[in-house]
Image: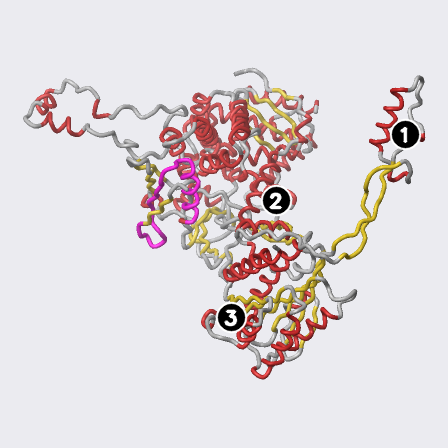
Amino acid sequence: MTADSRFLTSSPWYELFSRGSRDWLRHNEKVREAVHGQIMDLLSGDDVMTAGGDRVVRVPVRMLEHARFRLADARSQTGAGQGEAQAGDELRPAQAGDDAQGDEGEGGRGDGGFRLLLEFKVDDIVDWLIEEFELPDLKPAPSTTVEDDTIVREGTGRRGIRARLDRRRTVKEAVKRRAVQAEPKPFVDDDLRFHQLRTRPRIASDALVVFALDVSASMSAAERKLAKTFFFFALAGLRRRYRRIEVRFVAHTTEAWEFAEPQFFEVSGSGGTEASCAFRLAARLIDEHPGGPPANSYLFYASDGENAVEDREPALAALAGLAGRLNHFGYLETRPASTRFGQTQMRLIVADLKARGAPVDEDVVTELKDVWRAIRHFFVREAEGAR
Amino acid sequence: MNDLRDYAARLEALARTLGFTHHPVEFELVPDRFMMETAVYGLPVRMPHWSFGVRYIRELVQRQMGLSRIFEVMFPGDPCHAYLVDANSLAENVLVVAHVLGHADFASRNALFVRSMAMAGGHILEQAAARANRIEQALAVHGQARVEAVLDAALALEAHVDLQRELHRKPYGPPAAEAPARDDPFLERWRSLPGEAAAAAGERTGRPPLPPRPETDLLWFVAQHAPDLDGWERDIFLAVREESFYFHPVFACQIMNEGWASYWHARLLREADFLPNDLYLAAIKAHSDVVRPHAAGRTLALSVNPYHLGFSMWERVVAAQGLEAARRIVAEEDDFGFVRNHLDATLAEELDLFVYEASDDGRIRVVSRDIADVREAILGPRFNFGAPRVAASAVANDGALTLVHDHAGDGRGLDLDRAKRVLDYVVRVWRRPVALHTVDARGQPERLTVAPA
């Protein structure tokens, strides 16, 4: 008991190791797994669609809590404090709102408001979905149109520029030569080998996707969100099929306008609904596409199904004209649950088109769950169409 | 560094003359980051688990916001180990050395610490490292998912140990009924009464109930009686249990222990005439930054700083009853006895202690300054290792486990959402249905059940 205390020399590797970070990374992995299930709610940023597959979505998440047995929260919590205060003093008045639990209080609930921002690749999210909902994976679409030539590396030769020197082959040649020579030099010009280039024709895999949205007064924010979610995943699926995708956004009331994505979901118009104008604008976008009409084009249209009765014929005509040029026309009807089985003007138009054998699909969605069905429907159809 | 060694040696010599009985301490100057991790994990080397990662990042954020700073981490044992931050000033580290010596003295006297060390030995850190190592091996053999499932359950039940039992607890003995009959003339006569022999024999059929009485040592119970537990899984449960036993004295004596160390660092520095004046001044300034009732610039805090409370109480006790009496209290009490017996109304009044109530609407009101209320408000969260009282009450013939929460004793039911999640953890190692009885918010009986996947 009387031995003396002493100082140990500290190990220099302490700086190098961090089990805290290791466990933190593991936690983040678990969060990713947990978030997995709730992706639908996360994709509410304003430019998730146009930004492409490399894009990341930033998702604020709560930190996971390792659960323990704990007593239920009492209606009020007591604690001991220290300072000049008399019984009956009010230290903080009641606060408006129900999330007023202070972070100063002893019994502050939860994690004291720590949030973390996780980044998810849009591509990864789509991967999850494909797994989760057993969606068919969309393969790049074959096409017969030759688009342009591309330059690829192919073979080696004795001539070329320094930048394309094939070091491995060059050394091999030098070794072979040295093996047979009496007093070899390390390298001579004859050893040098260069990568050669060839031009190859490449097959086009481009597509134009037009999203059209009814923005008349009858479309509420909830309905737009359904439409947006559907658009997002349909696009994400198409991105897998085509190397290059161009996206256009069209909004309409009785007139149609083209928008950039951030504004697209924000605009709202007033007045009636005449879908024909949107279809005509879509046709123009396809026809006037720089470099000629694209090899593949898609039109998705979301609306609450209302359409002016007198617009029926023009809309049908516009769509029928478009149908020949489209790979697919997807119609998404966003409706409140109460009227989901009612027949609407747009459904009649679509049914008519279908009867004529046009590549048309329709889905009625009233909540996010339905969007899954619609997405699945679309994916399956696309996968079959590719065969 | 040499100055620090020199001062430490002289402080220790001074401490010995003042009657310290501590085991030698091995000090180590470590980087700030290592220190923080040690504080988060509770041990310098410990099993990996994602929940530590959460605590770690929270601590990191708080530290970067300047809200928390760690001066020392100390592990009692023989020898004790103490970590000091290499970036702290000499004055701060001199103060910390004196503080650590105070902790070491406390650990050598207090009955809980002495018992813990008698059961576990003096080489806790080495054993903890060996346990962590075994878990790493399990990770390599059985994969992350399986090891994590076991750790999820074991660490969730961390506080559910029966501290009255031994660290290396024996299995349940044979049923007590089979104890040999004594030579009691009354019992002899009783047994010879007609019909009595048959009844006694009839009772013994079937297996004895498991557990024989409600079992609060859940970690031990799962380790011993889970129907299909592998050896390595049992190891993990027992490893977590061992660490809980080690952490318990620190938890149960926080106010006394921090107070005692603070009392002694102040006194050692005061009596250390070999310290230069400016160093003493800087050190005592660091002391007053730590040992104070509320944050700088505030006059009120909704928590009680254990350093300050313990320090004030020990000053009072030593002044009133002398050092010998204080050392007897160190030996015999834990925080419950200490606060209930030695925090009196005058001191509480002097320290401005109060009880507040925070209601759901965010209102915080001071409800009492009564000494009995103050004591209970301080001690409430420390009761039963800070956890609700949950006991294993029965294992059915099919292996289904029933847990019972003592809601009457705890005053209300469990947080059902969390309880459900704990059951989800547990069922993955118990591998048979698990049920839990408690009450809901309205006091109605509530039975949570989970079945293995």
Q: Which residues are magenta?
A: B417-445
Q: Quadrant of residue B431?
A: top left
Residue bearing mark 1: A191
Amino acid beneath label 1: Asp
Q: Is residue A317 left or right of residue B349?
A: right
Q: Is residue B72 visible?
A: yes
Q: Residue A75 magenta-drawn?
A: no
Q: Which mark is residue B62?
A: 2
Q: Quadrant of the N terminus of chain B?
A: top right
| Residue B441 within the magenta-colored segment of the rendering | yes
Residue wearing tag 3: A335
Identify whether A310 is placed above or below A21: below
Circle 1 packing at 10 Å, graded few (<14), some (14-19), many (20+), is: some
Q: Secondary structure at mark 2?
A: helix
Q: Residue B399 at what x, y percent from top left?
A: 32, 35
Asked if badges 3 and 1 are on one and the same chain, I answer yes
Chain of residue at mark 2: B
- Residue nearer the viewer, B366 or A351: A351
| Mark 3, other Cα within 10 Å: few <14 / some 14–19 / many ≥20 | many
